[in-house]
Structures are given as structure tokens and as C-alpha cells.
Image (spheres, rainbow, N blue to C red):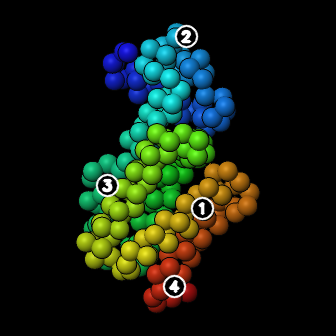
């Protein structure tokens, strides 16, 4: 198996695009090679089989979605209040929405995980680790709310992102900002918005 990290990353990025556009049924080594604009047979030199490819795509999604280290530090600057949490949630929704193909690929991976134990294990571990990190970070930083606040925001905003990326006409783009704010205000009560 080949070990060129840049080529492997390019193949995985191509696989994300194929998953987002064609779904899991369209994810073949040949489709990945075509998307990556490499000779046929290249992907099969990097991944032992389709399960290996799907699992590595899961890892790659999380690598690409991870915020820059400076971004995490910057997100903790300022007052620890509901307005700050609201800004963080807006930033999160935008960052994930900007990686549309990645999130759509993740939805395909989640469906595949119902049939592939190794992929299910990976995604379960990653989602659990992300939730644990977010809860811990929220509590240690002194943000308002508790563990349930973080979990409810996670659940509500994930589905809002699904709607935005899969059925964008359900909620017009200009309404998303208001909905994110409304979710935070309902989950994290406090003083009302100024008029």
C-alpha cells in the first residue's frame, strides 16, 4: 500500500466529493480516481477495500472540519454570556455549512455505519469525543448553561444544518440566522433581545 500522505489526502478529499454528489452507491475506486484526476487504479493502491476507504473518509472529514488552534482560543475571548454562545453557534453553523460536501458525505457515512461495524465504531467514538470535548470546554470556560444545554444545542443545530444543506427551500437562507439565535435563546433562557 502506498504512503504518500498528500496523495492519500487528495484521494480522500475526492472521495468526500463523490460521496456528497453520488452517494455511497457511487463511491468506487474508479470514481475516486476520476474525481482526483489521477490514473485509474491509484485509489486501490492506497485503500485495501471499500470499508477501508469509507473509514478513512470518516477520519478525513474530522481532520478538515477541525477548527484552527487559534480559532478555539479566539472563541473564548469576551464575556461568558448568552450573546457569546449565540455568536459561537452562528460561527459553527456557518463553518459546517461552508463545508457542504463534507457534511453531506458525513450523512452518507452515517447511513453506511448502520451496516458497517468498523465505520459505526469510528463515528460513534468521534461524535462522543466531540460532544465530551464541547461539554467540557463549555463548562470549564464558564459559559452559561450546563451539559444538557450543549447537548440540546448540538441536536437542534445539527438538524438545522441538515435542513439547510439538503432541503434549502424549507427555511430560506435569510431565516437561518434568526433560527440559530432563537434556538440558543430557547435552550439558554435569559434576558430578551433588545428591540
The circle on residue 193 is 4
Q: Nearer the viewer, mark 4 or mark 2?
A: 2
N-term-proximal mark, 4 vs 2: 2
Seen in the picture, residue 47 relative to 83 is either above or below; the reply is above
Viewer-proximal residue among 47 and 90 = 47
**Label 1 to label 2: alpha-carbon separation:** 37 Å
Residue 144, x across and y down, in percent: 36, 80
Closer to the observer: label 3 or label 4? 3
Q: Is there any visible trace of residue 138 in the rendered image?
A: yes
Residue ID for mark 3: 71
Q: CA distance from mark 4 to mark 2?
A: 57 Å
Evaluate if marks 1 and 4 touch, with contact meaning CB atoms under 8 Å apart: no
- The tag earlier along the polypeptide, 1 or 2, is 2
Q: Quickly name the residue at label 1.
A: 159
Q: Secondary structure at mark 1?
A: helix
- Tell me the residue at 70%/63% (across/down): 171
- At 60% from the left and 71% from the top, the residue drawn is 179
Placement of the C terminus among the 4 image quadrants: bottom right
Q: Residue under circle 2?
A: 40
At 45% across and 51% down in the image, what residue appears? Answer: 124
Amino acid at each position: 500500500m502506498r504512503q504518500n500522505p498528500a496523495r492519500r489526502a487528495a484521494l480522500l478529499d475526492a472521495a468526500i466529493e463523490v460521496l456528497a454528489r453520488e452517494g455511497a452507491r457511487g463511491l468506487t475506486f474508479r470514481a475516486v480516481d476520476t474525481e482526483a484526476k489521477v490514473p485509474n487504479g491509484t485509489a486501490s493502491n492506497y485503500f485495501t477495500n471499500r470499508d477501508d476507504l469509507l473509514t478513512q473518509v470518516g477520519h478525513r472529514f474530522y481532520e478538515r472540519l477541525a477548527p484552527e488552534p487559534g480559532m478555539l482560543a479566539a472563541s473564548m475571548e469576551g464575556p461568558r454570556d448568552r450573546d457569546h454562545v449565540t455568536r459561537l453557534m452562528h460561527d459553527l453553523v456557518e463553518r459546517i455549512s461552508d463545508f457542504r460536501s463534507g457534511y453531506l458525505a458525513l450523512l452518507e457515512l452515517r447511513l453506511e455505519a448502520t451496516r458497517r461495524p468498523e465505520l459505526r465504531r469510528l463515528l460513534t467514538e468521534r461524535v462522543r469525543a466531540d460532544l465530551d470535548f464541547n461539554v467540557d470546554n463549555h463548562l470549564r470556560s464558564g459559559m452559561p448553561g450546563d451539559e444538557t444545554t450543549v447537548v440540546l444545542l448540538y441536536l437542534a443545530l445539527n438538524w438545522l444544518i441538515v435542513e439547510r444543506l439538503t432541503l434549502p427551500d424549507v427555511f430560506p437562507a435569510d431565516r437561518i440566522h434568526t433560527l440559530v439565535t432563537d434556538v440558543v435563546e430557547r435552550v439558554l433562557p435569559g434576558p430578551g433581545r433588545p428591540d
